[in-house]
Amino acid sequence: MRNYSYWVGVLAAGLMVTGCAKPPTMEMADAENAVNAAAQAGAADFAANEFGMAQNALTDAREKMNAKDYKAALAGAIDAKAKAETAQAAIAAGKEAAKAAADETIKTVEAKLKDLKAKAAKMKGPNAAAVKSAVKTIETEWTAVMEENMNGNYLKVNNAAVGISGRIDALIKEASAPAPAAKPAKKGKK
């Protein structure tokens, strides 16, 4: 009987300890700091999948904390921190992929722009001035895109280049169209 009372006491003490566990505030703060650091490093842009998982894990840990399920909150905070660190580690690969895409896009747009300039230079007729003006505008915009590239803003480069490329294509089509034939002079009535 005495052995039975001992085990009941141990079980009751164990339930009290687990029921009154302390909130994992330090671990939650560590997880929030890790997620914030990943966000500031560019994880939302360059490691979106991993970063999304870290954010979801942190949200889940907060919900567990609010529900006073401290054991699950602790596990969630540890998971969120690990996922945020994974996201931060994936940023470099994401940036490298974005840089490679930007480099390829730049080559394509520059080739198109060169072609457009050559065609615009040969243009005559009423649309020539408008096309040449549009080329100058695109060159100015392209200079800004190249500055973004030098600053490492590869996603901006890719997004801007898509729009510029489309405009160049439309202008090439316009510049390649034959100039309208001159209308013969009308003969006046005598």
Image (spheres, grey):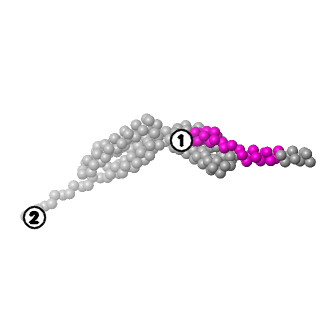
Viewer-proximal residue among 168 and 10? 10
Task: Name the residue that disc number 1 marks.
Answer: 39
Left or right position of 172 against 38: left
Task: Name the residue that disc number 2 marks.
Answer: 189
Left or right position of 103 against 10: left
- Which callout, 1 or 2, points to the residue nearer the camera? 1
Q: Relative to 123, say whether 89 is above or below.
A: above
Viewer-proximal residue among 71 and 59? 71
User: Residue, x 10% and y 64% (percent of image)?
Assistant: 189
The percent position of residue 109, horizontal first and vertical second, equals 41, 43
Residue at the extreme left of the image, as rendered: 190
Residue 16 magenta-drawn?
yes
Helix, strand or loop at label 2? It is loop
Q: Which amino acid lies under the numbered mark 2 shown in the image of this protein?
A: Lys
**Residues packed near mark 2 inside 10 Å, few (<14), some (14 to 19) or many (20 plus):** few
Magenta extent: 10-35
